[in-house]
Image (spheres, rainbow, N blue to C red):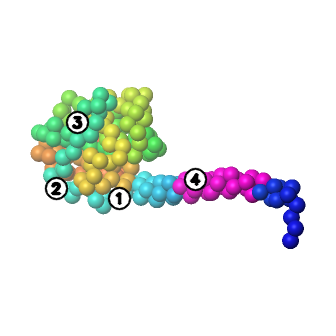
Amino acid sequence: MNVKPNQTQQADTQGQRQTPASVVSWVALAIAILVAGYVVRDQFELSMLRPGGDTAGLPEIGQPAPDFAAMNVDGDAIALSDFAGQPVWLNFWGAWCPPCRAEIPDMIQTYAQVRDDDVILMAVSLEEPSHEAFDYAEKAGMDFTVLSDPNREAIRGKYRVRSFPTHVFIDSDGIVREIVTTTMSTQTALNHLKDLN
């Protein structure tokens, strides 16, 4: 078969043009697969986080509350054991969680009524960057101990929080007395707190 030189050059040029395009196509496909993988993973993880009602994996009522330490807005590690001898209201929340945000005014009002009784309120943000949690807490006027554990490193294996918000009421002896896995009114929270001393 006789091929004219200009036909050969034309075929080579077309082949060279397709190579970069095919590389771009493969790169785009790889990126799409990675993005899809992250989306599926995130959706799976979020599907494990329910809006209330699940206490599986949390400490048992009547048992000692497991100690942990998480960072405050100043970057200091604050431990549950720092408040030994005091009743503690432990709240797991997130600024990304609408029910959590909805109950914050009631939490603020409740804490104002029990602050002088040496009750400690520790609000531990999960599943979000620390700066987002602290920014939201400041804007919302959360004037109690706000901590951040964005990747659940501090509570891993101790508090398997699956419902938001989750409240753990710990008496002055460090014993878990109540667990609530839904939002609470001021009066409901006060009822849980009155028996902790």
Q: Residues within 10 Å of mark 2 (few under 14, many from 20)?
A: few
The amino acid marked with disc number 1 is Asp
- Considering only order in the chain, which callout, 4 or 2, is on the residue closer to the N terminus? 4
Picture quadrant where residue 70 is located: top left
The amino acid marked with disc number 2 is Gly
- In this orientation, which residue lies closer to the viewer: 158 or 122? 158
Residue stretch rendered in magenta on the structure? 13-35
Horizontal side of 121 relative to 134 (left or right) equals left
Residue holding disc 4: 31
Q: Is residue 188 visible?
A: no
Q: Secondary structure at mark 2?
A: loop
Between disc 2 and disc 3, the foreground one is 3
Between disc 2 and disc 4, the foreground one is 4
Measured Cα–Cα span from mark 1 to mark 4: 36 Å
Between disc 4 and disc 3, the foreground one is 4
- Considering only order in the chain, which callout, 3 or 2, is on the residue closer to the N terminus? 2
